[in-house]
């Protein structure tokens, strides 16, 4: 479903921050008569467009882009082009926490195949003020985003209520993660633990070790990722990858 449409004139496209402000979450982009800046346009589109986005160009081809469909009208030729990043998007999975925030980055190769690019954990010390811990999560997550340039960020939803205080604190950390994604103009998706287990192991009540073994198998890793938060984050990324394939 198309949620956001951008119409770019020659003047708008020449504006310095036009691409950074608009392209990350655009589904459909209309471009009008920009022959003088076509090469720059092609490079910017390749860098910033999210997977699956469609570009409609009136009158001119875009260098490096292969039209999926061409219409000849009375005014000019119309080119329909699809984001070249569709085939291999990079997905960042996040397992929310305040002491340990797991992250895992995967890249979809083709069909159901995925490759692991990186994983780890963002740690904060218990004797540190909450505001400072949230700031650490924000800064470290921003570094990861800038380093790997993910096309999509997947975050696990909270699903526990035994300790209300812990739930509230982790909820605040999770809010910072969603805000960080928004600040970097990267779309987010959210999944419950049951959805993640179902996507990775085909069983929504699978034990943690079974899920971790499936993560190792699906990503062709030599060993189960450590710490556990990182393995969970990779499972979340895999769930997002499977969901986007079936969408």
Image (cartoon, rainbow, N blue to C red):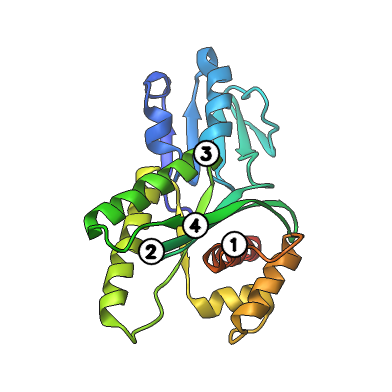
SS at badge 4: strand
- Residue 16: x, y in percent? 38, 21
Looking at the rendered image, the disc whose residue lies closer to the viewer, 2 or 3, is: 2
Classed neighbour count for the residue bearing mark 3: other residues with Cα under 10 Å, few (<14), some (14–19), many (≥20):
few
Disc 2 target residue: 99
- Residue 67: x, y in percent? 68, 34
Disc 4 target residue: 121
Q: Earlier in the sequence, mark 4 or mark 3?
A: 4
- Residue at 58%, 26% (x, y): give it: 42
Q: Earlier in the sequence, mark 4 or mark 2?
A: 2
Q: Nearer the viewer, residue 145 or 101?
A: 101
Circles 4 and 2: CB atoms closer than 8 Å = no
Looking at the rendered image, the disc whose residue lies closer to the viewer, 4 or 3, is: 4
**Vertical comparison of 35 with 62: above or below:** above
- Residue 29: x, y in percent? 49, 38
Q: Quadrant of residue 210?
A: bottom right
SS at badge 2: loop
Disc 1 target residue: 234
């Amino acid at each position: 479903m198309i949620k956001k449409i951008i119409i770019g004139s020659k003047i708008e496209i020449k504006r310095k921050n036009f691409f950074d402000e608009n392209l990350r979450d655009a589904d459909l982009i209309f471009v009008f008569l920009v022959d003088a800046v076509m090469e720059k346009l092609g490079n910017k589109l390749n860098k910033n467009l999210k997977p699956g986005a469609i570009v409609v160009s009136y009158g001119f081809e875009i260098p490096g882009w292969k039209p999926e469909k061409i219409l000849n009208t009375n005014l000019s030729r119309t080119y329909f082009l699809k984001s070249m990043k569709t085939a291999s998007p990079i997905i960042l999975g996040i397992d929310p926490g305040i002491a340990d925030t797991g992250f895992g980055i995967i890249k979809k190769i083709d069909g159901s195949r995925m490759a692991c690019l990186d994983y780890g954990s963002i740690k904060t010390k218990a004797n540190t003020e909450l505001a400072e811990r949230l700031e650490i999560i924000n800064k470290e997550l921003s570094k990861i985003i800038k380093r790997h340039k993910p096309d999509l960020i997947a975050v696990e939803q909270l699903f526990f209520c035994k300790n209300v205080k812990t739930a509230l604190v982790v909820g605040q950390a999770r809010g910072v993660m969603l805000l960080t994604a928004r600040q970097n103009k990267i779309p987010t998706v959210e999944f419950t633990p049951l959805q993640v287990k179902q996507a990775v192991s085909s069983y929504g009540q699978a034990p943690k070790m079974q899920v971790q073994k499936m993560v190792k198998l699906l990503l062709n890793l030599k060993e189960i990722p450590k710490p556990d938060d990182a393995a969970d984050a990779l499972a979340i990324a895999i769930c997002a990858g499977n969901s986007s394939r079936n969408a």
